[in-house]
Every structure is written in structure tokens, then in C-alpha cells.
Image (cartoon, helix red, strand yellow):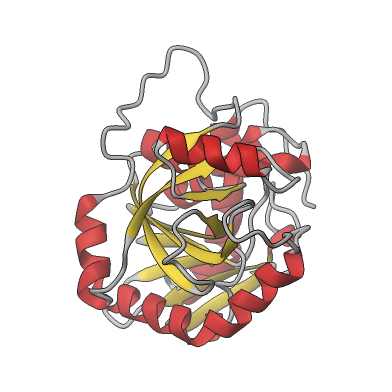
Amino acid sequence: MNTIDFADPSAAAATAADHVRRTLLAPAGIEGIDLALVLGSGWNQGVEELGEEIASVPLDEVPGFSKPVVQGHGGALRLARTPNGKVAMVLTGRTHFYEGRGVAPVVHGVRTAAALGATMLVLTNGCGGLDPAWAPGTAVLIADHINLTGATPLRGATFIDMSEAYSRRLMTVARQVEPSLPEGVYVQFSGPSYETPAEVKMAGILGGSLVGMSTALETIAAREAGLEVLGISLVTNAAAGISGENLDHQEVIEAGKQAGPRLTSLLQGLLAAL
């Protein structure tokens, strides 16, 4: 990992953004980016097909970023030009809250994207589904979230309106690409243990329909930075207690592999429309 001081998260993001700008964007004659994507479990297959590559670098060569510790994630920062001429930063991996590094590293990618000029952010993840109708491999739009980590990337009296945490405009665009996309409420747990059946039942009572270990904290940081957020979950398995089966991370990886071509097609459509 490229070590960086997160005592001032804004300064840390500025340092990372300056590095990307000097080493990757400037040589290509580009000043900044328009949007960013974070590809979670199952989403990084076909990343080479997401626009014309401008530059790519291992994540851990960028200040403040580190190699993903989760099997099924990639490990690169890729810059690409979308079909409509916009510049996208694609992160094939993320830092999770359960890694114990604190919240600032978890949202560092989001803040770096904002520092580079992004106005839109697409967050993806692999998760457990509470709706039995959502078979493994189902992509679900995130309409809202519940943050059960007990943490926040905000400091002090920083009051951010979360009435529309996930952009309705971007959800409409996503449905123009794939009209059949359902929507749900994502519940972020701390992890890294999978949720118990009782915890999944609690999530459902609270209004959740998707459970996982990422995304909500990133969305809060994105909204603080003024980014429009589109969230999409890949249901990789039925949440604990829904199907009666035990959970296995290998199942998550396999579901992502099976859904890979459809997810790539969805992301390609989004990048052409955004």
C-alpha cells in the first residue's frame, strides 16, 4: 500500500488525485474525469470492455490505495473514455470497513474521484438477497440504504441531506438500459462474518432487502462531495436463513462468474448513456 496520512482526508484525496493527474491523465492530455465506477465482487469481469483504455495502474501504486484483500475483486485503477466521450475512472477493488483501517481509507476512492472532477459515481457490490424471487445473478438497483456499521465518514457538525442518497435520475437511466431491473434497500453490516439468520430477519423488519459489507459508507462520502450516486447490487446468494443453505464465499465468486457477461453488458450500456 502507498502509505498516506489520513488525518486530513481531504488532503489525502488531493494527494492521490494529483498523482493520478500527473502520471496518468496529463500524459494523455486530459485534465480530469467525469465519472467513477467502483466494481465490487463479481463486477470486474470484462473491465477491458468498458470504454477505450487511457491508462491503468495497480491500485497500490496510488497514494492511499491498497491491494484488495478479497478474492473476486480486481486491483487496478483504470481510466477509460466512454462511448459518448466522457472520461471514467474505474476502480476494480475497494477497501472494506472490516479491514480495520478506519473509515477514511474505505471512502478514499470516492473522495479521490471527486477531487479529480467527477460528478457521478456508480457503486457496485455483491450481496445477499432477502427476496426469494431474486436468484443468484440478479442485478438490483439500490434505492436506499441502512448503515448498521455504527460509523460514518463525516466529521463534526457536517449535516448532509440523504433524502435522495441514490439518484432517481440515474436509476431512470439504468432502467432505460435494462428495464427489468428491480430495486431494493441495501443494509451494510460491518462484517467480515456473514450475517446470521436473526440479523437477516432484523434487516428485513427494518425495510432491507439486500445485505452486504460495503457501499453505504461510500455513498455518504459521495453525497458529502456532491456526487450523484447510482448503486447496483449483484445478488450472489440468498441471505442466511432465506434458503436454508450455508454461506460460502466461493459461492459469491461463482455467481459473479456466471453473471459476468450480463453485468458487463449492463455497465457498457450505462457508460454509453451517462
In the rendering, at what x and y percent does residue 73 appear? 68, 67
Q: Position of residue 18 (x, y in %)?
A: 56, 51
Nearest to the observer: residue 268 or residue 184? 184
Q: Is residue 271 visible?
A: yes
Foreground residue among 163 and 78: 163
Residue 197 spot, x, y in % from top left: 64, 44
Q: Quadrant of residue 200?
A: top right
Q: Residue at x 63, y 35 (%)?
A: 104
x and y, in percent, of residue 253 in the image = 68, 73
The residue positioned 56% from the left and 76% from the top of the image is 55
Examine the rendered structure and indicate whether residue 151 appears above or below residue 67.
above
Q: Is residue 31 visible?
A: no
Looking at the picture, tell me which residue is in the foreground, 215 or 53: 215
Is 172 left, or right, of 90 in this rendering? left
Question: In the figure, 140 relative to 239: above or below?
Answer: below
Pick whichever, 256 or 17, lies toward us: 256
Judge from the rendering whether residue 159 lies leftward or rightward of residue 108; answer left or right: left
Q: Is residue 7 left or right of 274 when viewed as pictured? A: right
Q: Residue furthest top?
A: 157
- The image quadrant of residue 127 is bottom right
The structure residue drawn at horizontal position 64% and vertical position 55%, both measured from the top left corner, is 94
Number of labelled discs?
0
Q: Quadrant of the C terminus?
A: bottom left
User: Residue at point 60% right, 75% down?
Assistant: 256
User: In the orientation shown, which residue stands out farthest toward the front?
Assistant: 244
Occupied quadrant, residue 250: bottom right
